[in-house]
Image (cartoon, rainbow, N blue to C red):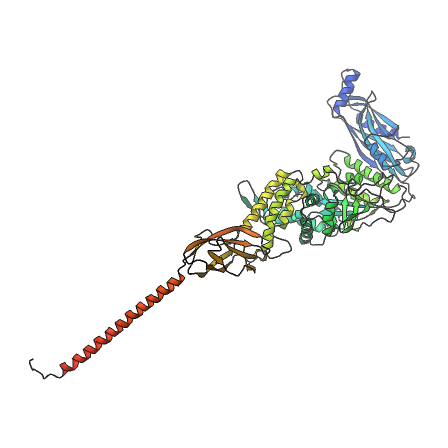
Amino acid sequence: MINKAALLAVLTTTLLFPAAVVPSVTANAQTTAMIRQSPQLVVEKISPEVPRDPAAEIKISGSFTNTGTEALTNLQIRLRFSSQPFARRADMALYLKGQGPQPGTWNQSFVPQAAPSAKVPWQFVSTPQQLGFTRPGVYPVTVEVIDSFGQQLAVQRTFLSYVPKGVKVPRTRLAMVLPIIDQPRRADDRTFVSDGLPASMAPGKRLGNLLRIAQDTTSAKNLSWVVDPALLDDAQALSRAYTIETKEKGENRPANAAAAEWLGDLRTALAKPPVVATPYADPDVAALAHNGIDDVTRTGIQAAELVAKQTLGRDVLTDVNWPVNGLIDYDGLDLLSTAGVGTVLLDELNLPPAIQQATTPDASATVESVSGPVTALVADTALSEIVGADTSAPGSALLNRQRFIAETAMISLEPVTAARTVVAAPPRRWDPDPAYVTDLAKTAAALPWLAPATLGAVKRGKGVPTPRTGLTYTDQNRREELGKGYVKSVRRVGARADLTAAVTTRQDLDVFDTALLRLTSSAWRDRDETAAPYVQRVGDAVDDRIEKISITGAEQSQIRTLAGKNGEVPITVHNGLGQDVDANEVTVRLKVTSDQPGQLRIESYEAQDESIVIRGGQNRTIRVPMTAMTTSGAQTTVTVQLTTEDGRKYGKPVELTVRTTGYTGIALVIVGAALLVMLAAVVMRVLRRRGSRRAAAAVAPRHAGAPAGTES
């Protein structure tokens, strides 16, 4: 029997208050009023959570609150239970929905009156033996409030898992996956478009709570963390002086100390637990596959490995992938497998059993890809819901924890001899209660029928594998991907960004790799308008970089004069990128073409067939030989185009006008004649000077021979 004395003692202590005067109403009106008031029933404590002794007391306690404006009278609080354990997990799910068989046996207590806003505590005390629990299993327990007309005003359904001491239950390996994934906050690497990240990192906020869970569960052996390195990269960028884009202009801001502290604390908390990295920025791999963008996934995995090691100071797993919502098709799987992924974490809907199963299948399965077999770990739906449950409502944390205990006990009690592994994975951008998740991890570690497992160490079960249908990906799943129009805009920016990569000295990551990955993030699903400023900003940054490699002189006079039939025209290429940075060194070719080859021919020149290297902040002048094909002077347009080594146009072409004189032969005759005239003039002048000197010499002796004083 239920210990009614204990129950009555609690109720009597609470309910001894002056009775309120309740106006007389009809039965129907009173019932309608009670339903409208929606009283609150909370289960606050179940002790012990797992009874092991048939004679040990079980205490189930809580409170009932009259949330209405009218007093409630003649209420009953009932504890309903059944001596028959559940046979299947599917029956447990129906029971929670109020469907299927419900507990029929009950004990009850009366509440004479509950004034408005009154909180009435209640407690039931019993033992497994008194409740009729005769064998190991999971049993239903329901607490409800009934009015004087037998109508249910409030109900809470929960479970009791009864496993007597000495009963050996096979251990089920459990891997709990906890994600730390956000949305991109930067467009290009230098500019933040959103300033919401620091606030989310504060204690009590989403990212602050995830940090707290990581700090409080450092010793847990059943947790695997899935982290987006783009979030860590954004945090690191905030820890230095940064720029944020406002409506008017870019605004420079100092380093954010809180972001630096968050990243440092996370690095410490994740120093030892298993960490899986999503591809950088968590790209929508399915959308990329369906839009023919095949190289981004591999780049994302490479970037994830580099950035995670830089920010966390340790190696992480990148060969394990968790597709968006645990859903992928064979096209997306092929992209992942060719990029080096050997294990994927999937939702049950994505890889369901071929036939309905009476027992829980092992999480491990195999799917075929273009690169060979890939291991699929199928997350358990019920356990994933429990880990990611919203526990903001009073009492919901306890009820979800009781359900977790019951679900895992039921799995281990199923008539299966082979050891199995189950995986629990909440939504990737969840907002959990740290205390609830930490308690859940501790509960899992203490349950005698569970053994810890990590995501990267899950091996295929030794039993007969459960036949599965293959990857199931619906039309609705495809409609939920990044939109085709949005992906097209990203593709256009990517094509221009690829030009900058083609002329830049090769680095581990190309200049705009991480920026483009941020544009393909799964966070932008159904958020095209939010993502649009990011696309615009990256596009502007790409165009700005392209324009910094230019033909100088284009803004001045574009007329070049070719003196003579043959000559050279100097063309200068300027690298306006910053100095002393290897990533700013560019390699280009120069393509010069004449619009009228019959009038002006371009001869072979440097940078036509060979590339030229220009360091940041420097110029390079190329002398291009040209030959005039006519003798008459003329002007010809010459187009100058920078190209990549593989011939793609880089930047806009520049048109120059080359003026040819066409007087080369005539000029030689004229110059020769002029020289002859000048020579003749010089000779005549010399002869004249000599004649004058001779005449002067002949006169001088005569004057010297005449006597002094003689008159002539």
Q: Does 63 appear above or below 211?
A: above
Instruction: Please give left or right for residue 666 compared with residue 648 in the image.
Output: left
Instruction: Please give left or right for residue 514 compared with residue 3 in the image.
Output: left
| Rendered-image quadrant of the N terminus | top right
Instruction: Please give left or right for residue 498 compared with residue 71 in the image.
Output: left
Q: Does 490 appear above or below 675?
A: above
Where does the image place residue 480, in percent across and percent down from the top left? Answer: 70, 38
Where does the image place residue 461, in percent across and percent down from the top left? Answer: 85, 48
Residue 608 shows in the view: yes
Which of these two is toward me, 548 or 263? 548
Where does the image place residue 167, in percent across and percent down from the top left? Answer: 92, 43
Residue 187 shows in the view: no
| Rendered-image quadrant of the C terminus | bottom left
Where does the image place residue 184, in percent across and percent down from the top left? Answer: 64, 44
Instruction: Please give left or right for residue 316 compared with residue 352 in the image.
Output: left
Q: Residue furthest left?
A: 711
Q: Quadrant of residue 685?
A: bottom left
Q: Quadrant of residue 22?
A: top right
Which of these two is toward me, 631 or 578? 631
Q: Does 666 appear above or below 390?
A: below
Which of these two is toward me, 548 or 194? 548
> Number of labelled discs?
0
